[in-house]
Structures are given as structure tokens and as C-alpha cells.
Amino acid sequence: MTYTIGLDFGTNSVRCLIVNTDSGDEHGTAIYEYETGRAGIILDSSDHNLARQNPADYIKGIEVTVKEAIARAKKNDKQFEPSDIIGIGVDTTGSTPIPVDARGMPLNMLVNFKDNPNACAWLWKDHTGYAEAAEITELAAKEHPEYLAKCGGTYSSEWFFSKILHCLRVDREVFDAAYTWVECADYVPAVLTGTTDPKQIKRCRCAAGHKAMFSDSWGGYPAKEFLSKLDPKLGELRRTLSDETLPIDKAAGGLTNEWAGKLGLPKGIPVAMGAFDAHLGAVGSGIAPGKLVKIIGTSTCDMVIWPTDSDLADVPGICGIVDGSIVPGFWGLEAGQSAVGDIFNWFVNYIQPGGASEGSHEVLTEKAANLRPGQSGLLALDWNNGNRTILVDQRLTGLLLGQTLHTKPEEIYRALIEATAFGALTIIDRFEEYGVKINEVINCGGIAEKNAMLMQIYADVTGREMKISRSSQSCALGSTIAGAVVAGKEKGGHESVAEAQAAMCGIKEQTFKPIPENRQVYQELHRLYKQLHDAFGLADYSGTLANVMKKLLSIKEQQQTAIA
Amino acid sequence: MTYTIGLDFGTNSVRCLIVNTDSGDEHGTAIYEYETGRAGIILDSSDHNLARQNPADYIKGIEVTVKEAIARAKKNDKQFEPSDIIGIGVDTTGSTPIPVDARGMPLNMLVNFKDNPNACAWLWKDHTGYAEAAEITELAAKEHPEYLAKCGGTYSSEWFFSKILHCLRVDREVFDAAYTWVECADYVPAVLTGTTDPKQIKRCRCAAGHKAMFSDSWGGYPAKEFLSKLDPKLGELRRTLSDETLPIDKAAGGLTNEWAGKLGLPKGIPVAMGAFDAHLGAVGSGIAPGKLVKIIGTSTCDMVIWPTDSDLADVPGICGIVDGSIVPGFWGLEAGQSAVGDIFNWFVNYIQPGGASEGSHEVLTEKAANLRPGQSGLLALDWNNGNRTILVDQRLTGLLLGQTLHTKPEEIYRALIEATAFGALTIIDRFEEYGVKINEVINCGGIAEKNAMLMQIYADVTGREMKISRSSQSCALGSTIAGAVVAGKEKGGHESVAEAQAAMCGIKEQTFKPIPENRQVYQELHRLYKQLHDAFGLADYSGTLANVMKKLLSIKEQQQTAIA
């Protein structure tokens, strides 16, 4: 028996997973909640756009979780030996760039930057660089439209250069102290493989391609001349960014003796190149051409792959189309919704509806499940955290329409779920409009596993069967797959990602099929959603919305009559 | 010393007020909460449009409250004698028509209709007749546009004929058993003056003119031929409606011996013609040309008067323009918002935000008061119960825009208050667009008295000083004024409404003046409100709304910067 380790660095915690490379069976797992800030996130009450993390939490998390996962694996299976672990894979959030000094040290680990949030990791959901994102988009649209073509036409405030340029603008001291900036997905493998010289840190294809406008077709990262126009200092940074990036079937290096000793693992076992959690989650969910993987959490990522030897249009509004970013040999296409679970959490935790005992996710879900589509007369936009796909506009906000003096919390809760389903359909429609046919939808993440009502609504709204990934830790499973591929077949691993997926992935038995009469109502509601979407999201909308409220009422009455 | 009694029949209770006719000083008051239904309203859980009342509650309320108010007046002032009471005035909700048989008996008091809601009083906020309202509007627009010109161009589902026609359509038995239908405002004086023959029941100018298309200029109520086209049975009802209607300075008759005995009042004292609560509330608040009276409760009424000998345009979207409906000798103009306090009550009672201890009106108000205009980035439409003025469309619904993952209950609470303020401004603007200049705004009702934040927001949004009526029972005070006028100067009353107002009304010392920097922000927000208002309310809107979300954000940032 051989095993690999997957390390999955999420928004609030890191998880370690040990799986059998033949079956994908999980032998041990452990979680470490980051200690710094609020649920692991450094916030600023005066600026809701700010979200940072302490890289020290990542390092501590490796040690705590790997040791604990090994202990559990031993307990679960007397035969298990840590010496049978043959490789490690890593996935992280992103774009989560970290400013590091010339010794590869994150700046916030230095005394003089200790409590400075700008010296920390800039978490994916940090939006402080929204003005810089607009600036980058504007310049690229004018001078290098090709930079934007593969990332949906708009450079996001969540991405690498927006954050770095914002730091340069607001905290020159931190910017100047940074030799370079590395993605969390590159930082963790560098730590494990002992790569302290930042010139030597290997950059993963996934982060560079999706968030930093990297493409082999224009020689890697954006040209120095382009970055210099944004700011000469940013241009200077260009030389610290390597010209090569690597996919997950390549190793970042071997595990250092020091880490091997500390963790009780074999020395020198390969550590795969990192990738974003969603990308490895897609791998762990069995992504293949024609299969959309939806990773549903606080936000969603919607992942598709497409053979690099086939024609593929630039799909507008998709966050990225990058060669080899998910599976080597395929374009990785990434779309997503900026908030899904976070919207439901907002309603429950911030609005705290329903009084003392009626406002939990469980109670609201139970009550909302008794409603028929359209019965509440409510319609919402799922933009409480902006819109990633297809509008690529993080600053958009939420909308709720149709409330009366009788509207109840569970009706709003369901309307918010439906709004995210309409957002999901918008992404599927966009893929298909540009020739990327979606034959199958596989969901993963806690919400997909736990909330049957949500999955049924997604099936009814999209008109597609919803399947759920077998593993409840698909991202970490994807990392173990990367670990198995870099270990190689000879050592007990696998020759390719597809071979590893065939052995290690699966689908749950229960699936959710569209219910025709619900589908029909949701088709009507979707037309109204689209009107709102376009009216508030597109600058050139020219319709009237006067029909929207009335049409909702007629659907509501029709559904109430259907009950009676 | 002489005194008059005001009986104020509200939505949930009836109040009796005894005041001194020289000073307006309140000598005794009492309230009776209606016993039937939920807070006095008969509801139907399967039809939110239905709202009825039990007329027996009105009768019982007279006896309970008059006796108790007299007892309190005696207790407060040893000199007080019930024999010094010289007149009675009555105000009620409306349009609240009651089907009565040939002996003037409300049908639900008959055994065979006892539990039939259609045989009860159809409360003002009953919207079951919305389809009939549309039918009446359509026919009138085609054949008698003059019928609609004075009531804003649209006949409402809340009004007299919509309700009667709906009853005819859904409950023929009740319709056929009714000799006629009388407004609550006419029913109560008829009871007190012993008018059992429905042919003799006097109809008040206020209800007939504002809710039943009555005008001397076309011979009273709508023509039989017109009503017959809606339904021949409705045409037959026309003969039961008198050709004359009377304003509040005319008496419905004298108090019967039986009632005088039961209540301990002098026999035969005059009972004034009734009027709607808002209309007598306007009188009690000191209405005069150029003075807008806003009666702010669950909904609002916005009342203006204008000399009948001056030119006045038909103001579109105003609920009614009726000669003598408020003060004899003046056009009474009535506008209103379908929900104000009811929207805040919905948020607190239905959504129950803020967890166990944070969701009361008091706590939400306290927290919301610390916010600056625009700081939340939220904007709402105040249409949770439809829009009375200026869109005259009861079926419109609410809207909330701008919510993020950080939006808090108090921010929504404030946005809802601001929405009602924008609705209030829309009414003032409409009056002025059509030449009805508003020089002064006097508010009355519990919300105006208790919620200083709301009054300040209204001042800031409208750019006008907000004054508050001195009496906290302005409607009942208006009724005592009517009682004083029908009693006449000789008996210790007054010669005219204006003379009585000069003696009996006043304004509170504290007023609310617009704060210039708030006013400026609200002017920006009002432009956005107007875009939403027009986009969702007007059929021919042709703008784009794409700017609305972004403009809200820029105001939000500007306001947050102002704090820092």
C-alpha cells in the first residue's frame, strides 16, 4: 500500500488528508484553524475591503495537521506506516500574494512589520485594490488587450497585480522592503522543499495564468514596459517573476530533511507544484472535458477543462482560460460566484432573522423547503459580494425585490438560494454560448453535501442533474492526486492525472434530477432575474423593469392557487 | 365650561376624547381594543388581501370608551359635568363599507351570516377587490374619465365600489341580502342618532367624494347606467345611494334618548357628520391653505386644502380632490403612502432581525441614529404594501438594494425609514408640480411624536421644517372640533371650523429643521430613488439603472471618509 498527503489551505483553516493511492480511501485527516484575526482573517473595521492572513499560521498548520493526520491514520489502520507516504500535494486559496524579503521571508515575520496588515498575505477576498484593478484593466484594454482576453476582459481587484499596486500606493515601506511577491500556493511548496532564495521559488501555472496574466504566448508575465506605465516601481518588480510556470504534475522539489524529521515523513519525497483549492478540487471531483465541477462554499468556483489541441473561443466574463492550470494538456477554464454560502451566512449571522430559535440555517432550510418556486413573490440578485462571472465587477451589490408586509425570513432565505442558482445558470449559459458544452455537473463542498434543498433548486433552475463528488474533501483529495502523480507509477503513484482520477475519485449515489413543474416556474423567474441582472449589471441596458414586480405577483398567485 | 366628545374609530381600536371647547384641553380619554380577529382584524391566512372587521366591535367600543372617558374626566377635574357636553364628532377608517339590511342592520349581525367575513365591515386595507378596481378604472377611463380625474386617474382596490363589486362576484348571497352598503363613517352617526332606515342614513361628503366617485357636478354618485355596465346588480344598488352628501359642519342628527341614557350624556345633543380619521386628523392638526398635514401611522395620509373659489388642476396620482371633504368651503386633497409604520413593523415583527435583544424598534432606532445619510450604501422602495400616491398601484412590492455581506439590521431599518421619507417627498413634489404650494408641514401620529430620528430624516429628505401637532390624538381632536361646530357658538361651541381650530389646536415647541449637509446627500439619494421608482413603477421607463449601485457606493465612501 502507498499513500499521499494533500494539504488544503482554505480561508479559515488548513486541512491535511492522507489517502490510499490505489482507491482514494481516506486514512487520516486533521484540521487546524488559523489563529490570527477573526476566524483566521485579519480585518479592518473601517475598511470592509481589507482581508489579510498571517503566513505563520500556514507554517504552524502544516506541522499540526500532518502529525495529527498520521496519528489518526495509524489508529484507523494498524498496517499504515508513514514510510509508505510517497508524495505531497498542496492547494491554497488565491490570488493570495505574500510580500517576501530577499531570504524568502514573509515581511510580517520581521520585527519592523510585525503588526502591519500590508506585510501579511493578501487574502483572495481582499478588495482594497479595486481602483488599481480598474487602472490595470484600462491600460491593458488600450495597450495589451490580449492580456485581458483570457481573463474575461476585466482584471479583478482580487488578483495579484491589483493587490501589489495597491500596496505600492498605500504603503511604500512595505513595497520597498519586498524583494518579490509570491502566491500562497507557491510559498507553501517552497517552504516544504527548503527554497529560501526567492529567485529560485517556482511559480505554479494555475496562479500565474489565472491571476497574473501569465501566458507563454507573450513570454510569461506582462511586459516590464506595461507594468512600468502603471508605476515604474512595479516595472522593476517584473525581473523577480520567473519566465517559467509549472503545472501540478511537476514537483516543486523534495521534502527537506528538517521537515521530514519534524513531520515523521520519508526524506526527499516529492512535493508537487501547488494550485488553487478550486482547481485541485476539480481534479479531486473527477473533472474531464464536458464535466463542470462546481465547488460550492462561501463562494463558488466553476471549473471546466478543454483539450489544448481543440479550438476554444475567449469566453467573456470567465475569470481565466489557462493552459494546464487544472489538468496538464487541457485549457483550464475558471468561472465563479463571489458569494454563495457567504450570502446565507450574512442573512443568518448579520441579519439574525427569525428571533431566538428560528433563525438557524437548519430551521430556515426546513421551512424554506416547504415553499414552492415563486410562491413568495421574491426575487434576489446574488451580488452581496459583487459578481465574478459573467460581469466581473466586485463592487456590485445585492438586491431583494417583491417583499410585502407578510414576507417571512424563510422566504428571503429561499430567494437568496434561488438567486445563487440563477447565478450558477448564468455561468453554464455563458460557457455554452461560446461552444463549451456542459454534459455533466459535479458539485462538491459542504453546502452541496448537506443541503438537499439547495441541490434540488440548482437542478430545477439549471434543468440539469446535480451530482455530488464522493469525497467530502475534494480539494485535499485533488492535492493527494497531484502528490501521487509527482511520485510516479514506479513508487506506487500514477502516470497521469486522468489515471489517478480513475483510481481515486467517485460520485455519490444520490443525485438530484430536475422536477419538470418546478423547472417551468424557474424558467419564468430566470427571465425576470436576467432583466434585473442586465439592468443593474450592464451599462447599456435599455429595457423597462415595470413588468418585473407584476410578473412576480402573477407567478406567486399561480403557485398559491396550485397549492389550494 | 363646555365640552365636546370625539370618537375616533381606528384600525385596531376606538378612542373617545373629551375636550374643552375653549382651549382644546383634554379632560378625559379612553381606548377600547376591538375584540374580533387578530388585533381587531378578521384575516384569512390563504388570502393576504382580505381584512374585515366586526361592526359589533364599533358599537361596544362606543359604550365602553365614552363611559370610561367621562369617569376619567370627572376624576381629573371635579368641576367637570357630563351635562356640559354639547356635541359629538366621529371619525373612522375608510373606505370601510358595511353591507346592511333593510333595517340598517350589518349583515354579520344576522344569524345566517354570522361567521361570514363578506358580511362584515370591509376594512380600508382589504385589497380583495383589486381585479374589480382595474375593471372600474378601465370602464371609467373609457366612458366617464371625469369620475377618475378627481381621484388620481385610478380607482383603488381599497375603495367602496371595488369592494361591493367583489362581494357581488364572490358571494352573491351576501350581496343580495344587503339593502345597501354604508361607510363606517356613516354607520356610527346613524347608530347614535337612531337612523335605522337605510334610506334615511346620511352619507358624508368625505367618504363619498374620496372613495365613491361622488360629485355634485355629475349629480352625485356614478350614474346607474355606468354601474350597470359593471354589473346590472350594481346598477340596481344606485337607487339606495342618496343624492346629497354632507360635510362635517352639518349634524347627522341628535343623540337618541336611549344612547343618552346608556352613556350618561344630555339627550339630543348634535352628532356631527362623520369623516375619515385622516381628514379630521388634519382638522385637529390645524390644516389651512398651504399647510400640509401628514398623519403618520401604519400608513400615512397627506392632507391639503385649497379654496373652492380658486383654480385647481386635477393632480394626477392624488387619491382625491373633493369639495368640502376636510373643511367646508375648501377642496380637500388627499394623498398618502400605503405603508409607513407597517414597513418598520414588518421588519421588526416578521423578519425579527438582530437576535433576541437587538431587534426592537427602540434598539434599531438608537443604532440607526448613529449612521450618516448614505453611509450604509442601501436604498429601498417603500412599496411593501403597494403605492397609493403617486402611482396608485396597490400591487407594487418592496425593494432593497445595496446590501453587502456586512449589511446590518439597523442599516436596513434606516433605509426603510429613508424610503418612506422619499415617498413623502414624492407627494410634496407632486402637489407643487400642479400649483398646490406647500408652505408648512405639520405631522401627527405616534411615530411623528416618538421617533425624532424619523422626523429629522423627513426634514433632511424633504428640505422642510417638520412641525408636530400639539395633540397626540389629533384625529379625535378633529372630531371634537366637528362636535363643537355642530353644537354652535350659542351653546358654547364655535361658528366655523377655522374658529374652532384657532381655539383648540396647536403645534409642539420642538420642530425639526433640515441639516444642510444631510440634505445634500439625500438630494443625491433621492435622484437614485426616483430612478428606481420610475423603473419599477412606470410602464414607459426607458433609462438604465446600471449607475444606481455604483453611485450608492460612491456616496457610501464619501460618507465613510467624512467620518474618518
Image (cartoon, coloured by chain):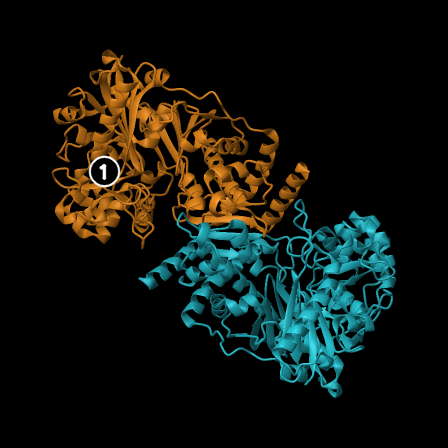
Chain colours: A cyan, B orange
Tell whether B435 sits left or right of A95.
left
**Viewer-nearest residue: A229 or A323:** A323
Tell whether A49 sits left or right of B47.
right
The relative height of residue A432 versus residue A166 in the rendered view (above or below) is: below
Tell whether B208 sits left or right of B312.
left
Chain letter for mark 1, please. Answer: B
**Viewer-nearest residue: A12 or A534:** A12
Residue under the image location 20 percent in, 49 percent down:
B116
- Mark 1: which secondary structure? helix
The relative height of residue B360 versus residue A33 in the rendered view (above or below) is: above
Task: Name the spot of residue B398 as percent of width and height, x first.
Answer: 46, 48
Q: Quadrant of residue A336?
A: bottom right
Task: Name the spot of residue B5 as percent of width and height, x first.
Answer: 26, 23
How crowded is the residue under tag 1: few (<14 C-alpha within 10 Å), some, or many (20+)?
Answer: some
Q: Which residue is mark 1?
A: B57
Task: Name the spot of residue A88 as percent of width and height, x first.
Answer: 73, 75
Q: Quadrant of the C terminus of chain A?
A: bottom left
Residue under the image location 35 percent in, 38 percent down:
B151
Task: Name the spot of residue B434 as percent of width and height, x first.
Answer: 45, 32
User: Is residue A454 something that shows in the picture?
Assistant: yes
Residue under the image location 58 percent in, 43 percent down:
B376
Residue under the image location 40 percent in, 62 percent down:
A370
Q: How many marks?
A: 1
